[in-house]
Image (tube, rainbow, N blue to C red):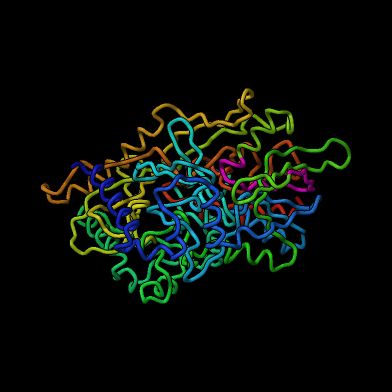
Amino acid sequence: MDRRGFVKGAGLAAAMLGFAGGGPLATGRSAAWAQYSWAEDYSPSPRAALYRSLVPEIFAPLPDPPDHVPALVIGSGFGAAITALRLAQSGTQVAVLERGSRWPSDRWRDIFANDTNPDGRGFWHRTIFTGATRIPQRIDPFGGVLDVSSYPGIDVWHGACVGGGSVVFTGVMIAPEQRFFDSVFRGVVDYREMHDVYYPKVRKMLRLSSIPNDLYHSCAFAHARAWDEQVRAAGYTPQRIDGMWNWHIIRNELAGRSRPSATVGLSDLGNSNGAKFDLNQNYLRYAERTGCARIYPGHRVDAIAKESGASGRYTVAVTKLAPTGETLRTRTLTCDTLFLAAGAIGTSELLVRARATGALPNLNEHIGEGWGSNGDVGLARPLRSFDLGTQGTPSASRILDEADAPVSLESWFIPGATSFDIGILASLGIVLDDTRGRFVYDSATGRVELEWPDNAAAGYLARAREVNNKVACDCPPLTRPALDADASFTAHPLGGAVIGRATDQYGRVRGYRGLYVMDGAAVPGSTGTVNPSLTICALAERNIEQIIRSGG
């Protein structure tokens, strides 16, 4: 069996263990699942009843936003949460609209879906999901936490819940090297200002730190130690990675004081016990505490426009959704200032549609341009250690190779394969690459599509594979199989409303006063060989500070 076959077989075997009630996966299911057969048809009706019993909070009546609000924020991820907090602290009344649900956390409850054998809580109204293992999985349609937008040549993963991407990522928060940052932002944003002021500001708010030594040496992170051993043998020096994790909760998992989550390969679909210090525990919570900000889950924004006449208010067409997908209400809200932070997909779609339909005709030619995948590549190589563990989620280390195109590799768990080591080490490769796509409006369907160049990922895929192969060459020849690399997906979409082009240097959309881009759509397709979350946060802190200080 080749390595790809082994990955698939091991993942399926793990799933079988979970279904049969044996092995580590069995601990991830509550008794409520016993009455539902995994062989039954994926009808949303019985599953909705199950989800209601497991997570009744997301079925509670949803509050309605006021008809008019001074400031409206679309989205609730990194850029949105920061924008909402800083506006609220300035005394501005803010409404935050989020299409997804607001999920709770609990030490023992089965709140989120399991990455290995997920259900509808994991995905935003999908019936099929093909993850990093490339194994198609059948999903019952429901309003889960992760959306997957499929375009020719690439799948894009992005959040669909209160907290956005902070709920469905591996917690990695890294600042890029200045030379890489400058090559991407080209002087529009001053790196020294980011380095000296805004990166530290975010680090303090999110309490970023690297994995403590006691956890690094625990059974949950055997794969992290093996990863470090391999890269050292290949001549690299692994660097510790900062993350937004509550290490105390992770210690509780290992000590049996909490349901296992981050220590058994769960992250991409949420951590039920709050082990990840997501935005619901910091920026969003602090914004609500001011009394000036309120969050409205279950509100999907369909279109934006600007009223003619003296008022000049922005209009926002909203659909109120039940978790099961039914439309509860449609409305049009108004606001004086509109902050777009629905992610590089959502923000770009709203702007491209508004320009094409004449709702915002003064948007310039750069709207929809400059979209990139951040050079993401999923990689695998063999594990040659007999020290086996349980696939702890937090990434411990990274390496940087600048021999040709700069590329970093980060230690990773195996998303969606299993919660214990199966003879494979995973890495996330991030290549500094200038491949870009663009969003276009299809008038026949009313959809916004991504034009991604044919074979767009070939160059950065080959570069990431080259570094991964260099590390794997240290493995004994008899155990070295054909390696796997995959650039058909990204969890780091960036661009579509690039700062300094579609907007000014602080996110003000050109052609419209009071309209702003505050999220990853403003980033020019890459954050320079690192995960984009820290840069998105720091950029949002920088921009909203200047917007408030200048009065708009």
Front-most of residues 285 and 83: 285
Main SS, magenta region, reads strand
Figure check: 136 above or below 295: above
Is residue 31 left or right of 19 when viewed as pictured? right
Q: In which quarter of the image is residue 439?
A: top right
Q: Which residue is drawn at 39% across and 52% down?
A: 117
Asked whether 358 or 433 is in front, the reply is: 358
Report x, y in % for residue 146. 51, 49
The answer, for residue 182, to whether it is visible in the render is no
From what the image shows, is residue 446 above or below residue 5? Answer: above
Q: Residue drawn 56% across and 46% down?
A: 520
Depth check: give the residue in front, 489 or 397.
489
Residue 155 spot, x, y in % from top left: 45, 38
The residue at the far left in this view is 478
Check residue 352 for magenta coloring: no
Point out residue 59 in the picture as x, y percentages from the top left corner.
62, 58
Q: In this view, does 228 lie above or below 460?
A: below
Name the outermost residue toward the top: 444
Q: Position of residue 141 (x, y in %)?
A: 52, 45
State whether residue 219 appears in this view: yes
Residues in magenta, as a range: 330-347
- Say which residue appears at 58% left-offset and 28% top-offset: 440
Residue 342 is covered by the magenta coloring: yes
Counting the numbered discs, the total is: 0
Q: In this view, does 245 lie to the left or right of 386?
A: right
The quarter of the image holding the N terminus is top left
Q: Is 172 situated left or right of 104 in this image? A: left
